[in-house]
Image (cartoon, rainbow, N blue to C red):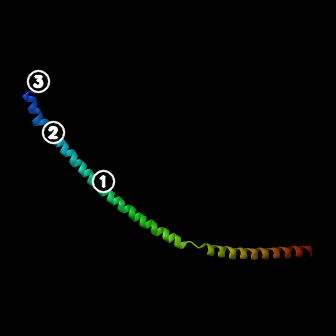
């Protein structure tokens, strides 16, 4: 087997194909580098935003937690409210009984 190439084919490969492929490779590498830079800058922006949102959420949770009443104070308020309702119920029972007695007379 004799592997001889035509001089026109060798000229085409060296004059056209190799520079074209080299330029394509350089363009792809530049494009990928630009894309990587854009992705990295976007990642930094998003990570800053996420950390800011995290700190805002922590502050909000602290604010909400400080606004909640403790269980002891809730039980105390419930017992006071229950005592008042029982007193009102007693007064209504007394009023009803007095009206019933007044009807019977």
Q: CA distance from mark 2 to mark 3?
A: 29 Å
- Residue lying at 45% horizontally and 65% vertically, measured from the top left: 57
- Looking at this view, is 30 or 6 the one in front? 6
Mark 3 neighbour class, 10 Å CA radius: few under 14, some 14 to 19, many 20 or more: few
Q: Which residue position holds label 3?
A: 2
Is tag 1's residue or tag 3's residue first in the polypeptide sequence? Answer: 3
Closer to us: 95 or 15: 15
The reply to whether callout 2 and callout 3 are in contact (CB within 8 Å) is no
Quadrant (top left/top right/bottom left/bottom right) for the C terminus? bottom right
Q: Give the alpha-carbon distance from disc 1 to disc 2, as whole Å.
A: 28 Å
Furthest residue in direction right, as rendered = 105
Residue at mark 1:
39
Residue to which mark 2 is pinned: 20
Query: Disc 2 or disc 3, which is closer to the eye?
Result: 3
Mark 2 Cα shell of 10 Å, populated few (<14), some (14-19), many (≥20): few
Image-based side of 83 in relation to 73, left or right: right
Frontmost residue, 80 versus 88: 80
**Residue 95: horizontal and vertical position, in percent?**
82, 76
Mark 1 in CB contact with mark 2 (< 8 angstroms): no
Q: Secondary structure at mark 3?
A: loop
């Amino acid at each position: 087997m004799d592997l001889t190439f035509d001089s026109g084919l060798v000229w085409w490969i060296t004059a056209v194909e190799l520079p074209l492929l080299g330029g394509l490779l350089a363009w792809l590498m530049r494009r990928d580098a630009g894309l990587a830079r854009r992705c990295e800058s976007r990642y930094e922006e998003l990570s800053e935003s996420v950390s800011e949102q995290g700190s805002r959420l922590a502050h909000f949770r602290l604010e909400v937690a400080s606004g909640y009443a403790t269980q002891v104070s809730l039980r105390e308020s419930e017992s006071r409210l229950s005592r008042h309702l029982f007193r009102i119920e007693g007064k209504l029972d007394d009023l009803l009984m007095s009206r019933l007695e007044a009807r019977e007379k």
